[in-house]
Amino acid sequence: MSSQAATNTPIRIAQWTTGNVGRQAVKRIVERPDMELVGLYAYSEDKVGRDVGELAGLGRTLGVAATDDIDEIIALRPDCVSYMPLVPDIGVMARLLGAGINIVTTSEFLTGRAHGDEAVATLRRAAQAGSASVFGSGINPGWIEYVAAVASSPCRVVERVRITESYNLSLMAADANMDDFGWGRPAGDPGHARDIEDAVFEFRDAADRHGQPGDRDAGDQRHPGGRRRARGYRDLRRPSTRRRTAHGVPVAAAELRRG
């Protein structure tokens, strides 16, 4: 894409879904002269054939109709797919990467670690075959994982990075979220710890991302339901995880050390 910037050729973007995040992405893409929106993928049948401008609430049409056929998106040969479903589909991502299409995503995907070694290997093979890349970001997890890398940029040597992240879940007081965390279940309820682990699986990616700027693995990852040993790409010589609480719920404060 750097060569496109040098020649003032717009980056051709296909948007994947027009949910809450996707609609905002569409608005930003069409505002930028260095980007061109060329396609839209939609899951719902009632969206297929409709103009992206209508679906994104722009109040005008853009001449780009939604499709539910991935082959049509690939045939457009976009430079990048703005991939924003609620949950990523590793198979779909691999098809896009293998076709030479870069991906940027906010779909609970930062490094892929949370989805398992097989998923990471699949995406790596596809990306290498298509000479493409994937960049994961988002809000929670997402942007905070890059703060440490940016903040440490003036430093020649980084001895320790500590990030404590807490979130006010009262803003997400929906039944599904309450069920995920097991609130209201009796203490010691069988399977409680496992259910919490499944509910926060994407934060394994967050811990992995914390470790990468310092060229270190994230070591141990902990969550309120217990402890899981992180399996990563690099070793952290002196990992430690200290217990903290936020709104009465224990959270992890991981220290990444050099030395």
Image (cartoon, rainbow, N blue to C red):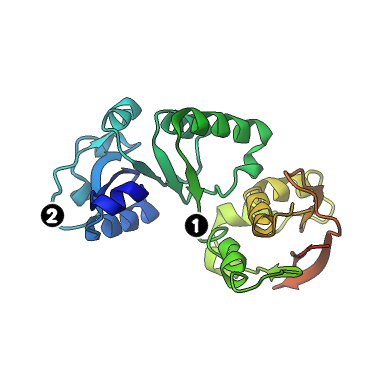
Residue at 81% of width from left, 67% of height from top? 243
On the image, numbered disc 2 is attached to which residue? 60
> Taking 120 as reference, is 35 left or right?
left
Residue at 30% of width from left, 38% of height from top? 78
On the image, numbered disc 1 is attached to which residue? 138
Relative image position of residue 240 (x, y in whole percent): 84, 62
Q: Is residue 157 above or below residue 99?
A: below
Q: Nearer the viewer, mark 2 or mark 1?
A: 1
> Taking 105 as reference, is 145 left or right?
right
Q: Residues within 10 Å of mark 2 (few under 14, many from 20)?
A: few
* Residue 182 occupies quadrant: bottom right
> Taking 20 as reference, is 112 left or right?
right
The answer to whether the residues at label 2 and label 1 have Cβ atoms under 8 Å apart is no
Relative image position of residue 224 (x, y in whole percent): 76, 58
* C-alpha separation, residue under disc 2 versus residue under disc 1: 27 Å
Q: Residues within 10 Å of mark 1 (few under 14, many from 20)?
A: some
Front-most of residues 72 and 216: 216
- First-in-chain label (2 vs 1): 2
* Residue 257 occupies quadrant: bottom right
Q: Quarter of the image containing the C terminus?
A: bottom right
Front-most of residues 5 and 144: 5
Relative image position of residue 253 (x, y in whole percent): 75, 67
Task: Identify the element where label 1 is drawn.
Answer: loop
Residue at 82% of width from left, 67% of height from top? 242
Residue 201 visible from this viewpoint? yes
Residue 18 visible from this viewpoint? no
Front-most of residues 97 and 215: 215
- The mark found on residue 226 in the picture is none
Amino acid under disc 1: Gly
Relative image position of residue 187 (x, y in whole percent): 82, 56
Residue at 27% of width from left, 58% of height from top? 27
Amino acid under disc 2: Arg
